[in-house]
Amino acid sequence: MLDGIPDRGGAPCFPIVFTRQLLERVSGEEMSMPDARSAEDVALLEKLVGSSPSLASTRGWGARFGRELNASDDKALFWSGPTGWPVLEGKHVHPFQVRVPPSVSRLRPGAEFCASLQRAAFERPRLGYRDVACPTNRLTLIAAMLPAESVTVHTVFCLKTSLPDDEQWFLCGVLNSFVANFLVRLRVTTHVTTAIVSRLPVPRPAPGSSALAGIAELAHELAGCPRPEESREYVDLQGRVARLYQLTEGEMAHLLGTFPLVPAATRSAVLRGFAATEPRRRG
């Protein structure tokens, strides 16, 4: 086995270079090393993190995520009866969709009126994403709009910042994109922490703009699709998000190649759709 290891190091063996500035943009004071596997990964990472303010930045969305209830600490509030608001877990959150089985736990009658539950926050739809994930999964960042009159436990992070519904749907589309998943996979081990998501670079189109409305509408449509990842809307959304980040066709092809468990047909369709609508450069 040792015969395959070069006697000398150097650039051919270590082609990946991280600048201090890049590490600060990616992980802040933590200065943690992203799991980039090639110089192409680093170049794409550098372009993406330099494209927009981070999701939590006041120069951008100023969005903050957090937990609601805890499955262990708050178990006295739950029951298996037929009435009460559903208690959602990470396993109920799928790309663009929340799937609530008949066996879901619910809040006990009267529990929803408890002051500690901050009833107003649960009465409205809000964006949420799964906490537990793995960079080797088909997808790592999985988000959906949680229904009104539901509560979540610690395996779901929910948007705490008050944003209009259309802007939340836009963010739902971006978080479910291959671009956002590429970025998250470079930092995740087993949990998609709020620290990771807060540092995602996310463009903020003008309110009412076609860029914002188009992605928001597609995300809303995908919430009702039987198989969202096989739909035309999914392909369209992925292309629109990639264009927000001003990716080239070559960069998009490289990015899609980092998702080996996504069906090849899906990746090919996304790349074809992106290439067909990529703005032509003036020669």
Image (cartoon, rainbow, N blue to C red):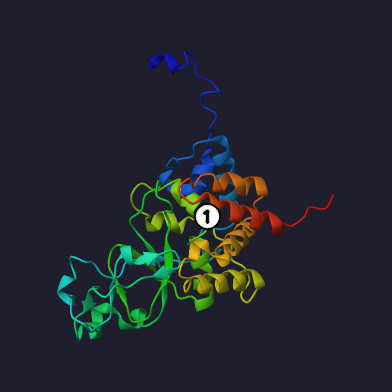
Count of labels in the image:
1
The answer to whether any part of residue 28 appears in the image is: no
Task: Using residue 81 as the reference point, say whether residue 39 is left or right of it.
Answer: right
Please indicate whether residue 145 sits to the left or right of residue 73 in the image: right
Work out whether 4 lies above or below 172.
above
Question: Closer to the camera, 199 or 96?
Answer: 96
SS at mark 1? helix
Q: Residue furthest left?
A: 76
Query: Mark 1: which amino acid?
Result: Phe
- Indicate whether 78 appears above or below 2: below
**Residue 202 image-quadrant placement:** bottom right
**Viewport quadrant of the N terminus:** top left
Query: How busy is the neighbourhood of tag 1: few (under 14 within 10 Å), some, or many (20 plus)?
Result: many
Residue 128, position as x, y percentages in the image: 40, 68
Q: What is the x, y in percent for residue 224?
A: 47, 74
Residue positioned 24% across, 83% down in the render: 84
Reading the image, the residue beneath label 1 is: 178
Residue positioned 64% across, 52% down in the render:
247
Corner quadrant of residue 149: bottom left
Q: Height in image: 171 above or below 242? A: below
Picture coordinates of residue 31, whole percent (x, y)? 44, 43
Q: Please tell me which residue is depicted at 60% across the width and 64% down the height of the picture.
A: 236
Q: Residue at x 23, y 77 (%)?
A: 106
Percent x, y of residue 252 = 61, 49
Asked whether the viewer can see residue 100, the reply is yes
Above or below 199: residue 127: below
